[in-house]
Image (cartoon, grey):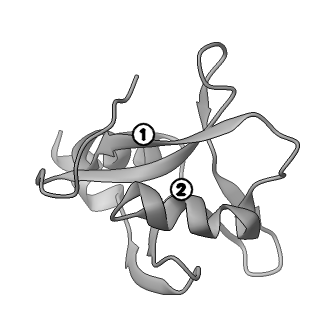
């Protein structure tokens, strides 16, 4: 599904993947209070791992994996998720609405 990439590669970001290896799924979150669904994404694997305590259950099986931005945009649009680019502390750097990009394909 995904592979490790260095931060020098253009277009690659990191997301959380549940159950790596079998029955994999992207970790997306539903904030019912705010009425938004989002996938947290990071510029590098280290930031994703440092921030995992904010999102992931430590007992759960997950990995931070690289995915190309275009692939994540398509998936997020199909599943009605926004993408939040976060830093290692969980602060939002950018909110990405993938829906317009999906309409072009």
Q: Residues within 10 Å of mark 2 (few under 14, many from 20)?
A: many
Q: Is residue 51 visible?
A: yes
The residue singled out by tag 2 in the image is 81
If you read the primary sequence from the N terminus, does the residue marked by circle 1 or circle 2 appear first? 1
Quick one: SS at disc 1? helix
Give the residue drawn at x 35%, y 57%. 99
Separation (CA) of disc 1 from disc 2: 8 Å
**Image mark for residue 29:** none
Q: Is residue 38 above or below residue 105?
A: below
Give the residue drawn at x 48%, y 50%. 15
x%, y% of residue 105?
18, 38
x%, y% of residue 13?
32, 54
**Image mark for residue 75:** 1
Give the residue drawn at x 61%, y 31%. 25
On screen, residue 80 versus residue 75, left or right, reads: right
Task: Out of 63 and 41, give the one closest to the viewer.
Answer: 63
Give the residue drawn at x 33%, y 37%. 4
On screen, residue 43 versus residue 48, left or right, reads: left
Q: Is residue 39 visible?
A: no
| Quadrant where the N terminus is found in the figure | top left
């Amino acid at each position: 599904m995904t592979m490790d990439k260095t931060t020098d590669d253009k277009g690659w970001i990191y997301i959380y993947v549940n159950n790596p290896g079998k029955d994999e799924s992207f970790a997306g979150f539903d904030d019912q209070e705010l009425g938004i669904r989002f996938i947290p994404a990071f510029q590098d694997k280290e930031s994703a791992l440092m921030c995992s305590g904010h999102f992931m259950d430590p007992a759960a099986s997950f990995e931070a994996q690289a995915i190309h931005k275009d692939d994540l945009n398509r998936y997020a649009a199909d599943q009605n998720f926004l993408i939040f680019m976060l830093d290692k502390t969980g602060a939002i750097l950018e909110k990405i609405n993938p829906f317009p990009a999906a309409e072009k394909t």
